[in-house]
Amino acid sequence: MTTVALIVFPPEAEVSPFEKVCGIPLILRHLLVLREAEVRDAFVVGELGEEGKSLVLEAERKIGVKARCFEADQASELSEALGRFRRVLVIDGRYGFESMLLKAALRAGEARALVDGDSEQPEGTPRVRIGDGSAEEISPYVQGPYFAGVALLPAESLHRSLRAGVRPDDPEGIVTAGAPEIVDLAEVSPYDPERRRPVKPTWRFLSSRAEIPRLRKALVGGTQKRTLDVMAWYVHRHIENFLTYLLAETPLTPNQMTVITFLVALCVAALFASGHLLAGALLALAVNVMDGLDGKLARAKAMTTKVGLLEHSLDLFYEQSWYIAYSYAAWKASGGRTSVVVALLGVLLFDSFARHIYMQFRQATGVSLSDVAPFDRAFRRFDGRRNIYSLYILGGAIAHIPWFAVYVMAFHAFVTAAVYLVRAAKHLRNIDLGRSEAP
């Protein structure tokens, strides 16, 4: 075993470990964030009581993170437990953050602490006094950049600190005793393929309960993807962020949101197949907004899972069911034109081909095709996707020419597939030659 997280709740903390952030108790949220960062072992230090200990001990069964609790006077027991690990990810439990912060700390390397010189934080947030590039003191009363609440230390360093009398419930003392090198968060902020942009992790020091709504707003705002089509960017994201902010405090889980969206989407297909094209088109517009909520809820609540990735498969299923059902109604309305059937086959083939190219590129490079170069980002605004096709579907329903909408969708799908193929081949060739344009 290599890395263990040490989550410390000092006695002077103003916010309880059980205070809910985006509907999740803070202590449980920390463990969920660890899972997202692929850290599966944790030690929790603080006055948690029986309720807290039970919650922590249940974490392995419920979320896959093995956690143990320690009291402030159990320094020797904690030191012994650390013996199985090489590195310790020290986390101040008074902070709220997303998993990208922990990934940044792991990326920064051993014997390093994260600071942020460009962040708006509440009064009382600990700062770091730096000497020779290392942390000399962490306190709200010193001058220097903000301490981001996370440091990666060698386990041996923590052993020495505990033997020297540093209290297990003193996160600032633990980090300072390790004399870690200071790393600015902006220097190690990684590219996030889910959000299609380099991400400076969201974090906030919870100096009081009043900071929790501010943290929630920041977490929801941080879920936004960068490169989207015109409908998603100029219309959907504002509605999605508002709804995500409201839903984040409810018990609704991202996977439940996925199921609800899928069921409503099937109703759209049923409306199309039965000839209720306008009603189906309007409901499709609502589904397009709903589709963005599960991912944003997952990132805001720190509940991203491998199972959740199946959402993309469900998207493919219901989207193509829309195209088939709408084309069936268009075929009937056209008097049985063979060209409508041919156009439908074009939509299905070219749309699937474009999706596969996009997914293969991301699998090969770790970067979305639409993020590689300015042309790709510009084309992404208008490429053939469900949001754009839904406008064609709506227009065809209003004008009573649904077959024409199918023709336009087929043409747009062909152009998208062709552009994707050419651009992906170009970029992959550049990678082969060592001239990658990836961010």
Image: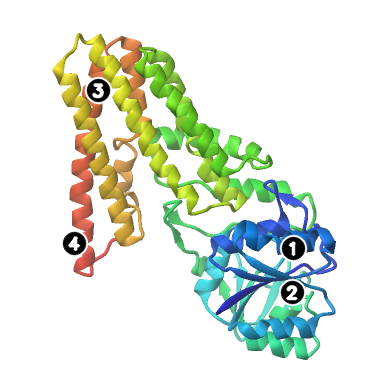
For label 1, the SS is loop
Mark-to-mark CA distance, 2 and 3: 61 Å
Q: Give whichever of 115, 228 is nearer the camera.
A: 228
Q: Which residue is mark 2?
A: 171
Decide: few, some or many residues near mark 4? Use Cα within 10 Å; few <14, some 14-19, many ≥20.
Answer: few
Mark-to-mark CA distance, 2 and 4: 49 Å
Q: Which residue is mark 1?
A: 94
Q: Which residue is mark 3?
A: 406
Q: Which residue is mark 4?
A: 429
For label 2, the SS is helix
Colour convention: rainbow
| Amino acid type assigned to the residue bearing label 1 in the image | Arg
Q: Along the polypeptide, which appears first: circle 2 or circle 4?
A: 2
Q: Are marks 2 and 1 in contact (CB under 8 Å)?
A: yes
Decide: few, some or many residues near mark 3? Use Cα within 10 Å; few <14, some 14-19, many ≥20.
Answer: many
Q: Which residue appears at 67% of the width and 61% of the height?
A: 59
Q: Position of residue 81 (x, y in %)?
A: 69, 81
| Amino acid type assigned to the residue bearing label 3 in the image | Val
From the viewer's perspective, is the residue at label 3 or at label 1 nearer?
3
| Amino acid type assigned to the residue bearing label 2 in the image | Pro
Is any atom of residue 148 visible in this view? no
